[in-house]
Structure formats: C-alpha cells, structure tokens
Image (tube, helix red, strand yellow):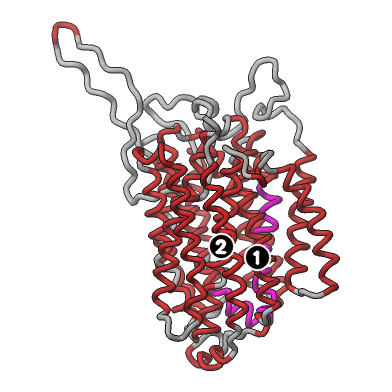
Amino acid sequence: MTASWDGPGGAGDSRGAHGGAVKGGHDGGGSASPARVPVPLPVPAPAPGGAPPLPRPRQETVLSRGYRALTLGIVSVVFLVAFEATAVGTAMPVAADELDGVSVYAFAFSALFTTSLLGMVVSGQWADRRGPLPPLAWGIGSFGAGLVLSGTAATMGIFVLGRAVQGIGGGLLIVALYVTVSRAYPEVLRPTVLACFAAAWVVPAVVGPLIAGSVTQHLGWRWVFLGVPLLVVVPLVVMLPALRRAASGPLPGRPGEPGRPGTGQGRVDRGRLKYALALATGAGLLQYAGQEPDLLAALPAAAGAALLVPAALRLLPRGTYRAARGLPAVVLLRGIAAGGFVVAESFVPLMLVSQRGLSVTMAGLALAAGGATWALGSFTQSRARFGPYRERLARGGMVLVTGAVAYSPAVLAESVPVWTLAVAMAVGCYGMGLVISSTSVLLLQLSAPEEAGKNSAALQMSDSLSNVVLLAATGTAFALFGGGSVSVGAGGGAGGHAAAAAEGRPLAFVAVYAVAALVCAMGVGVAGRLRGQA
C-alpha cells in the first residue's frame, strides 16, 4: 500500500509527470533511515569572474520537506494495519474456539481476502477517475468498522461478517495507497518509499504477537480487535493536507481524448465492476464449499468456479495464468508468493497451540522475527546496484519461501525444537521481502501513469485471489484429515496445554503445508519470466 506527491527541487507535477512509470504496493524494502537518492540535475555553470560554481541543491529523500508529512502519514497507516494483522493472527485461535468456529478457521481469514477483491476493483476505477483520496478515506473507515464488528461478535457468523467488511476497506485502502505513491513520488524515490512500508512492519511483527497474546489471556481476545480503529485517525489527519496538495483529483486528460481514463470524465467501467462482484462471489462459494467437504459441497464449489474463472480471466492481464513474460508473470508471481506464504503463516499459531501445547503468546512469538527479516529483504532489493538483477532476486526469494513452508510441519515431531520453526519463518519472510517488493517495483516500471489504478488493482487482486483459493483448498484438506476437531484447550492458556496437545491432528497440518509448498515451488519457475523478451 503506497502513496505519492509533489516534492521540492524539480519533482514536477505529481499528477502526470513521472515519466510513464506507475506503481503501488503495501510492501517494499525497509530501511530505518531512508537512503539519499540523487535527483538528476544539470551541472552548475561557473559564476562570472572565475568565482566557484554555486552549490548543488540538496538531494531529495522521502523525508525532505515536501514529502515528509505524506511519508510519515502513510507509513503510520501501514504501521497500524501491520499491528492489526499480526495481532489478529495471534488472537484468532482463541476467538474461533470461544465462538465455536474452529471448523471454519480458514474462512475467518479468507472472508477478508474475498471481499477485498471487490474493494480493489472499485478503488482502482475510483482512484483513476477522482484521485486516491476518496477511496483512501472510505477504506480506512470500512476497515475500522469491520474491526469493531468482529470485536463485538456474539457468533462466528457475525465475526466472519466483520472480517468481510474489513476486507472491503482493505481493498479500497491498498490500491489507493499504490496510486498515491505513483503520483506523489518521482520514480527514483519509489523503492525507498516501499522500503519504508516494509520497515513499518518491523515493530508490529516483534511486539504485536506479545501484546496480542497478553491482551488475549488477561483481557480477552475482543480487545485485540477493538483497540486499533481510533488510532488510525491521527495519521489520517496528518497526511490529508499533503495528499490533497500532491495527488488529489484526476490525472489531466490529453487533448482530443474526452473519455480517457484519468480525466475524471470517462464512464465507470460497469463491466469490470460486475466481473469483480462475480469474482468475489465465486471465491466466497469456493471457500464455503471447502469447509464441508462432502457431496453436498460439490454444488457451491462448481458454482463458485463457474463465476470465478471467467471473471479472473477478464480482470487480470491477458496471459497471467500461462505466465506470459512481463506484466502477466509479475502479477501471477505476486499471487503465488502471497497465497502460499499466507496460508503457511496463518496456520502456525493454531498448529503450535493445538499440537505442541504452547500458549497463544508463545505461538505468536514464533512469527515475531518475520517483520524484521521481511523489511531486510525489501531493503536489499531497494539498493540501486541490485536493480538489473531484480528477476534473480525474486527467484532467490521464492527458493527461500519454498524451503521455509516445506520445513514448517517438521515441528509436529516432539523431537524438533519449536525455535527452528521461528528461524525458518524468518528466512521465509526475508524471501518474501525480496519477492513482494520486486514485483511492486516491476509493476510500476511496466505501467503507464493512467493505468496506475487498474494495474495496482490487478496486482492486489492476484494477491487476494490466491489467498482465497489456497485457503479454500487447504481448508478442505484440513477438514478432510480431521482438522475440525482440533482444540486449543482452555483458551490457549497454560492450563489447557496438556488437553490441547492431546487433541492433535498432525496429518491435517501436514496436508495444509504440502499444498502450500507445492504452490511456492511453482513460483520459482514463474520468477524467471518477469521481464519481457529482449
């Protein structure tokens, strides 16, 4: 999720003068202090009379005067979203157990991804026509409303509904941030902005599980959901003036093109909206069918596939599912990497609590190092010297991700120390930092300014669609091998450790990680096709 604006010192009009590259992403490389990035400037001429030349203007960074407020605002939003994501993952096993919803555990995650598909398409068109500010504001509002709904839920159905509302907000938010970055920052600063986004995940990833686990055990899981929404107000207020100044409104149209996307005068593409609705509905039906793997589930599964497949083919770049070189392969790799790793990461707390008898706090800490290593991977790819080798970085990252996912079920054996899983997930997160940030940078390089919303939406749709489909597939495998009877004991507390371990269904977790590892291995091949033919 990203943002953009005009900066001092020759950045130009951020609403249309960035040289044809557009991009977005809620990921990126991370550096605690943004690196200085030189802005090309003419060599100053000698002053009359042999005096020394005038000094060059100061080099621009993402914290220069013209960019500072927007950078701090959008990074703060990403920080709070990151904290919510890490905290919810830690509290989810207890929430599902208390609401008698462990059998639909995967659905509590995929509901968010399912509805975000619709939000992304809406946000892409909205941002291209009116600028990123409206979808950004509505996205933050919907995201907070979903958290409140889940936090006050009395049944698992209401809980999942809250996650769905949160997903709509997330879809609006992430694409709007992408468009903001493409408009507000010159191309040379965009990798650094993405690096800052990844850095914003470091602290939440380290302290989020610990805080969420402590809150869950002492105050209850509901406060994990209810504590975040009000905190988003401050960064939103900080960033709004700069966002209005730098990236509000439509892109200027070109003469003779009254219907050109970006002029604000073209029609809404209702066809894309219909396909987005079909995509979200189909994804939801597939996930629903995956929770009850019997003959009766065949009907919603078939209906879901019939809706999802044609819609996905229309909404994603042509050639995506055959990994055509260039933009289609970039979009496909994003989905493969995100889907495979999110599935693996989502089941880690449940596996450690139910199979190894850990408390929810300790289980969450198994993922704590991932934020720092993800940011490190993003920082690595943001270095200018690695620009020509971005395809190799992505492929190497996928190798690391595949190895981490494949190793995860090893901790089902009592003889394998749990800390080794923490190390494996940290390595996998480093690989994800390389892959996710590289695909974001490549998307911007391969996109024209007026296609910022559409292509950013496609990248994020691939991400969320893969999450939904893989969570449906792994949820089915989990249920088939008895995962629905898994228990977290007495709320995941110390008193329930023995009972939790006794409820082991190790084959259910092995099935989940086998599917995820196979998908990630496919991504290694796709990563070799990210650039077009020479």
Q: Does the stretch in magenta take in 98?
A: yes
Mark 2 belongs to which amino acid?
Val
Mark 1 belongs to which amino acid?
Leu
Name the residue nearer the viewer: 35 or 458: 458
Q: Residue furthest left?
A: 50
Task: Let me know if residue 167 appears in the view.
Answer: yes
Q: Which residue occupies 33% across, 22% down?
A: 41
Q: Which residue occupies 38% across, 60% down?
A: 372
The mark tally for this picture is 2
Q: Is residue 520 above or below residue 510?
A: above
Residue 55 location, quadrant: top left
Task: Let me know if residue 243 appears in the view.
Answer: no
User: Could you give the CA–CA distance between mark 2 and mark 1, rounded to whole angstroms?
Assistant: 9 Å
Name the residue nearer the viewer: 281 or 388: 388
Residue 7 location, quadrant: top left
Q: Position of residue 297 (x, y in %)?
A: 82, 70
Q: Position of residue 273 (x, y in %)?
A: 76, 44
> What segment carries the magenta color?
91-120
Of callouts 2 and 1, the N-terminal one: 2
Does residue 38 appear left or right of residue 414 in this picture?
Answer: left
User: Which residue is denoted by mark 2 in the rendering?
Assistant: 342
Q: Does the stretch in magenta take in 103?
A: yes
Mark 2 in CB contact with mark 1 (< 8 angstroms): yes
Q: Position of residue 406 (x, y in %)?
A: 51, 68
User: Which residue is denoted by mark 1 in the rendering?
Assistant: 471
Q: Which residue occupies 44% across, 52% down?
A: 396
